[in-house]
Amino acid sequence: MSSDVERKASNEHTFRDANEQLQAGAVGLVEGDQDPVPFLCECSRAECTEVVLLTLAEYERVRSGSRRGVAKPGHEDLSIERVLDQNDRFTVTEKFGAAGEMYGQSDPRT
């Protein structure tokens, strides 16, 4: 695996782990199913500090696959992931190839 692909997958993994903690903290605090929760953009850009808003149900749908992530629209990296879904608030991506293997194996839910 190239060091660039490894770095990108590692960056996205770090943001996903932080979002898992945000989700755990939001459970019980969010009153309605439609209340948005701030999550971190899980893009491969190390300098990214963007926030995306998802309901807890939307975040659960994103996390239904170990290779899936969430990013701000326009932050997807088509060299390591494909776009599965997109709206005006967030993009759902799925990693493939070596990045997908690394990302999927590092899923804290598995």
Image (spheres, grey):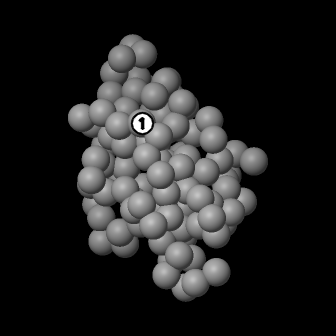
Q: Position of residue 88 (x, y in %)?
A: 24, 35
Nearest the viewer among 69 and 34 is: 69
Residue drawn at x 30%, y 71% as measured from the top left? 47
Q: Amino acid at mark 1?
A: Asp
Q: x and y percent of residue 81 in the render?
A: 49, 57
Identity of the residue drawn at 37% across and 72% down: 46
Q: Position of residue 19 (x, y in %)?
A: 48, 48
Q: Which residue is mark 1?
A: 85
Q: Label 1, secondary structure: give it.
A: strand
Q: Say few, some or many: other residues with alpha carbon within 10 Å of mark 1 (under 14 / 14 to 19 / 20 or more).
A: few
Q: Say whether residue 38 is visible.
A: no
Quarter where residue 42 is shown? bottom left
Q: Is residue 89 visible?
A: yes
- Position above or below: 46 against 53: below
Residue positioned 30% across, 49% down in the render:
72
Residue lying at the far bottom of the rendered structure: 3
- In the shown orientation, is residue 49 left or right of residue 69? left
Residue at 37% of width from left, 49% of height from top?
A: 71
Residue 69 on image: x %, y %: 49, 48
Q: How many marks?
A: 1
